Amino acid sequence: MQDENRITTNRENCTYTSCYCEENVWKLCEFVRAERTAPLEQVFAVFISNKNRTVPLWKQKSGRGDHPVIWDYHVILLHVSPQSDAMVYDLDTVLSFPCSLQLYGAKALRSDYGIKPAFHRKFRVIPADVFLQNFASDRSHMRKADGSWQMPPPSYPPIHTAESQMNLDDFISMESSVGWGSIYSLNDFLQRFIQKTSSETSSAAATSLSS
């Protein structure tokens, strides 16, 4: 991928806080808007979750070997440009940054085939401008019962809107009746955004989650 098609030069330039993937992607969207490194209409925030909040992802920094990490949700940035393949920006992956969606699908998402239904992934795809305008988090989901942090929060103030202090659940939800954006199954997501879809894409077996 040529540098002129990248929305940022490398991951070290990105604002990053471990376990705050939604804010990391919000900040990356904000960077694209401010620096105009890509047309904002080509950029999307993608929430990955399901009704059980148990979604496996491979090739994550916190993973071990070829075993998946089971997240309650995860957030990536998707750049869809007519000049190149759809690209994924995932600050928590060990794959390249960015990584083509086709490769990310094959290596990190793999397939829902052979996986228990409780682990099937869904995707809420939100245009970057909509995400920037509407997302809010007071970070209360990262507080323990005694008020202490499960993981240290970002150093900048919480992201709020005029209408909301906290609506993270509306983005994590995979119910179409709430929130913003469009919801896809794994197969539909890959077929929608990979320009040349192959029947072999993401066909790797997930034996560790097999029934």
Image (cartoon, helix red, strand yellow):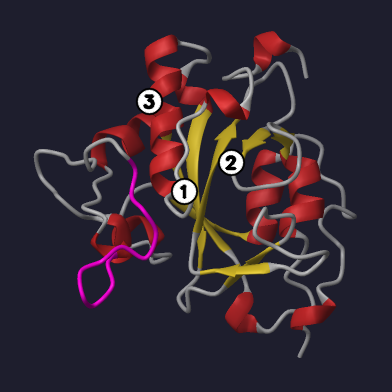
Give yes or no for residue 24 being in the magenta stretch.
no
- Quickly name the residue at label 2: 91
Front disc: 2 or 3? 2
The structure residue drawn at horizontal position 20% and vertical position 69%, both measured from the top left corner, is: 147
Q: Which of marks 2 and 3 is nearer the N terminus?
A: 3
Question: Regarding mark 3 in the picture, which secondary structure is present there?
Answer: helix
The structure residue drawn at horizontal position 38% and vertical position 43%, both measured from the top left corner, is: 23
Q: Are marks 2 and 1 in contact (CB under 8 Å)?
A: yes
Q: Give the range drawn in magenta.
A: 143-154
Quarter of the image for the N terminus: give it.
Answer: top right
The reply, left or right, for residue 21 in relation to residue 169 is: right
Quarter of the image for the C terminus: give it.
Answer: bottom right
- Quickly name the residue at label 1: 21
Question: Would you identify the image quadrant in which residue 133 lies?
Answer: top left
Q: Where is residue 173 in the image (x, y as percent from the top left)?
A: 38, 64
Task: Kindly report the distance in space between the C-alpha atoms of the residues bearing marks 1 and 3.
Answer: 14 Å
> How busy is the neighbourhood of tag 1: few (under 14 within 10 Å), some, or many (20 plus)?
many
Circle on res. 30: 3
Q: Is residue 59 visible?
A: yes
Task: Kindly report the distance in space between the C-alpha atoms of the residues bearing marks 2 and 1.
Answer: 8 Å
Q: Which of marks 1 and 3 is nearer the N terminus?
A: 1
